[in-house]
Every structure is written in C-alpha cells, then in structure tokens.
Image (cartoon, helix red, strand yellow):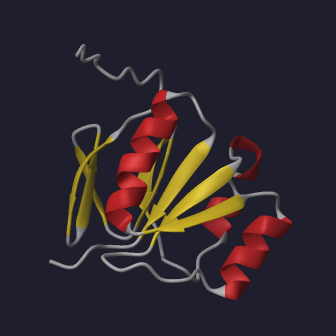
Amino acid sequence: MQLNEIQYSDAQPIESYGADFFRIGGEMVTAPALIHAEGARHWAGLDDTTAILEMADKLDFILLGTGSDLAHAPAAFRKTLEDAGIGVEVMKTDSACRTYNVLVSEGRRVAAALLPVDG
C-alpha cells in the first residue's frame, strides 16, 4: 500500500475540533464556525444564512455539520440556500469535517457550516 500526503492548494484543512472550537491553519475558531477555502470564522448558527449567502458565487454546496447527532436542516435554512443555488448536505459534524478536507483537497467549491460537538 502506498500512502500519499493530501495536498491543499489554497484552502486550509480542518486540523482538529472540540466542544467549542475548530482549528484551521493553526488558528482556533470558536464554534459554531463557517469554514471555506478563503478562511474560517465564527458563525451565528442556523439562523444565520446571510454569511453563507455572501459566498454564493464561490460555492456549489455547503456541508452542514449538525453536532454530535444527525439532525435535519431547518426547512427555512435549506430553502433560503437552495433558492440561492447552494446545495445543502447534512451530516454529523465529525463527518462534515472529514468530508470537507477531502473535497477541498480536490479543489471543490464547498464550505462547511459546523455546529459544535458535545464535550
């Protein structure tokens, strides 16, 4: 078996996470967080679609990490983003972190909106 190191062109991978943080490029971002190829920042949560809509021209879809448990995206959240042409993929936050890292290593136009995991 041959192992290859993943290369991230311009994007920063999610290095680690905990109950109240995500580490991206050596920097800590308070959870919940919005992470994309151009950086990461604190996110106001499921009531905040504005921050995601501001990146609509740079995204094909968003990974919504719902915390430690899988939950449905609120209908209004999903509708607002889909009406703007942004697909929504819902998964647990740990899965969303791993999936985000793979997708950005492939150069995909994706962001991750991540709710915190249980401590």
Instruction: Tell me which residue sits at (58%, 83%) in the image.
Output: 47
Q: Quadrant of the N terminus?
A: top left
Q: Nearer the viewer, residue 32 or 75?
A: 75
Q: Quadrant of the C terminus?
A: bottom left
Residue farthest along the front direction in this orientation: 1
119 left or right of 90 in image: left
95 left or right of 53 in image: left
39 left or right of 17 in image: right
Q: Picture coordinates of residue 91 (x, y %)? A: 47, 67
Q: Picture coordinates of residue 101 (x, y %)? A: 40, 40
Residue 101, compared with residue 111, is above or below; it is: above
Instruction: Tell me which residue sits at (25%, 13%) in the image.
Output: 2
Q: Quadrant of residue 92?
A: bottom left
How many numbered marks are there?
0
Instruction: Tell me which residue sits at (78%, 66%) in the image.
Output: 82
Q: Picture coordinates of residue 70 (x, y %)? A: 42, 78
Residue 50, compared with residue 38, is above or below; it is: below
Residue 85, compared with residue 32, is above or below; it is: above
Q: Picture coordinates of residue 55 (x, y %)? A: 68, 51
Instruction: Tell me which residue sits at (39%, 73%) in the image.
Output: 115
Residue 3, compared with residue 78, is above or below; it is: above
Q: Nearer the viewer, residue 113 or 92?
A: 92
